[in-house]
């Protein structure tokens, strides 16, 4: 189900039926990049609208790739490896197109201002498809480094499947990382169009470290580990202890990847061990915070029914990220090893236990009795805030739907969406476990690609190996 969702989010020229299972979607965005003289057809819409935002799209692909890299055996056993690879490749094929020169990356297509005035199916789009880039004059380290991380992580996944593609991805990742590092600037200072929707609150330090760690894991090259050690303090990797993990703030992910290097008992020098231990202590802060095992005031808030709650707007993204990080860390620990928290030790079983509890809640074990994974169970959101799902399918009625007309005819309808967007994970309930299934309630009913991506790994981890 979660892999199906990515097919519903595809932009561009859709493949034939057996490679595209969402029959209510058609081709869209076929002129993307045309005005700028570059082919930017493809990639993903990030949520219920039609802007292609580079930063969350890249983070989505990094997390999908991490899911597969970590749990390839379980995904294969479930018969879903081919779909997982297709979901990743739909993103990386687009990044290859968008990276037109070593120091040029097209980072966004579409304009959220005009896009949000329209309630149209992607197949009918009449809004601006202006494309925005970062380059040497106007660099954007977050988006360049996150795209490098995505391509490096994806190269690991394709290593045994398609050696040539793996090599191409690694090459792009190395160039993008070099660009992100050499020309340092916040991407929302260079591209004004991202400020309203995906501004970078944490700056680019986490993305640079994240990309370096993925490049190290993908290439095995010592220079990337040296970078992570050398820049640990300057880029806040060993200074910031944070209780959330998201498309914007990756420090917890960075710190857990760094901990993995320590836990693998590899040959490291004293300086490397010392710095990696600092990363590890911050990783432990994040995990203990989710487990409610830090000192009072330093833990993630929980709803009365036990859902991790970070903020009202699309809280499920933080739940998905936490469930995934708890799972991988529990797998990095040895059998008899524990996580050491201020309030006491936590066993591997307790770590994966919290992952399972969050997944169970998400799938319907909650006071509202709602599965926040659309299409799962008998009760799930029927009015997801999503233009294509809430409008009549293009295949059923090709009559053009205009901007305002879409609001009148489809957005404003009381009824259920005509199309079920299977595998979407919506924003979820509030801090009291209450949820209102209304199309206009986008803080709770909009779904995003980066909500589902980490859950691919979580669901794989919780699938018993037969």
Image (tube, helix red, strand yellow):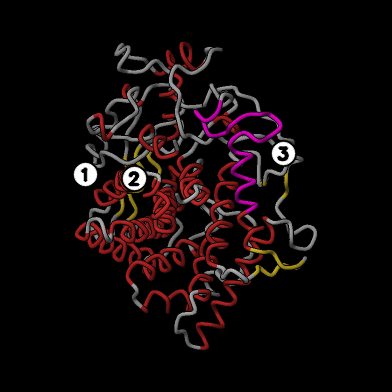
Can residue 44 be found in the magenta stretch? Answer: no
Residue found 26% across the figure and 42% down from its top: 40
Disc 1 packing (10 Å; few <14; some 14–19; many ≥20) = some
Left or right of 174 on screen, residue 407: right
Residue found 52% across the figure and 26% down from its top: 384
Q: Secondary structure at mark 3?
A: loop
Q: CA distance from mark 3 to mark 2?
A: 37 Å
Q: CA distance from mark 3 to mark 1?
A: 45 Å
Q: Which residues are magenta?
A: 353-377
Which residue has dot 2 on it? Answer: 132
Check the image and name the residue furthest to the bottom.
270
First reached walking from the N terminus: tag 3 or tag 2: 2
Can residue 368 be found in the magenta stretch? Answer: yes
Residue 171 pos. (x, y %)? 25, 64
First reached walking from the N terminus: tag 3 or tag 1: 1
Which residue has dot 1 on it? Answer: 38
């Amino acid at each position: 189900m979660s892999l199906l969702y990515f097919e519903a989010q595809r932009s561009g020229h859709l493949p034939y039926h057996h490679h595209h299972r969402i029959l209510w979607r058609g081709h869209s965005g076929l002129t993307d990049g045309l005005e700028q003289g570059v082919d930017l057809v493809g990639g993903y819409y990030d949520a219920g609208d039609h802007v292609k935002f580079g930063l969350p799209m890249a983070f989505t692909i990094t997390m999908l790739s991490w899911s597969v890299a970590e749990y390839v055996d379980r995904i294969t056993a479930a018969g879903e490896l081919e779909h997982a690879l297709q979901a990743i490749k739909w993103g990386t094929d687009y990044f290859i197109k968008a990276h037109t020169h070593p120091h040029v990356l097209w980072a966004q297509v579409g304009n959220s201002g005009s896009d949000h005035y329209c309630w149209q199916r992607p197949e009918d789009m009449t809004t601006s498809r202006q494309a925005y880039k970062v380059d040497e004059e106007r660099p954007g380290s977050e988006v360049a480094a996150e795209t490098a991380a995505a391509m490096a992580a994806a190269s690991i996944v394709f290593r045994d499947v398609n050696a040539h593609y793996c090599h191409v991805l690694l090459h792009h990742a190395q160039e993008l990382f070099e660009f992100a590092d050499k020309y340092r600037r916040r991407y929302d200072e260079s591209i004004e169009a991202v400020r309203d929707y995906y501004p970078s609150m944490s700056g680019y330090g986490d993305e640079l470290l994240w990309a370096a760690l993925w490049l190290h894991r993908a290439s095995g090259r010592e220079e990337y580990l040296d970078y992570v050690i050398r820049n640990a303090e300057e880029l806040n990797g060993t200074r910031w202890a944070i209780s959330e993990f998201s498309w914007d703030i990756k420090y917890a992910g960075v710190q857990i990847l760094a901990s993995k290097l320590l836990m693998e008992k590899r040959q490291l020098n004293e300086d490397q061990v010392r710095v990696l231990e600092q990363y590890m202590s911050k990783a432990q802060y994040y995990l203990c915070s989710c487990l409610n095992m830090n000192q009072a005031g330093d833990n993630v808030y929980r709803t009365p029914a036990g859902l991790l709650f970070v903020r009202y707007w699309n809280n499920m993204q933080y739940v998905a990220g936490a469930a995934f990080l708890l799972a991988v860390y529990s797998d990095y620990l040895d059998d008899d090893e524990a996580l050491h928290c201020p309030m006491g030790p936590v066993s591997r079983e307790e770590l994966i236990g919290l992952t399972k509890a969050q997944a169970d809640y998400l799938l319907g074990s909650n006071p509202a009795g709602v599965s926040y994974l659309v299409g799962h169970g008998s009760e799930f959101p029927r009015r997801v805030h999503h233009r294509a799902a809430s409008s009549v399918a293009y295949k059923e009625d090709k009559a053009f739907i205009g901007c305002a007309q879409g609001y009148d005819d489809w957005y404003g309808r009381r009824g259920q969406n005509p199309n079920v967007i299977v595998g979407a994970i919506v924003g979820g309930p509030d801090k009291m476990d209450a949820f209102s299934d209304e199309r206009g309630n986008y803080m709770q009913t909009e779904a995003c690609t980066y909500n589902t991506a980490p859950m691919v790994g979580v669901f794989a981890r919780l699938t018993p190996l037969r």
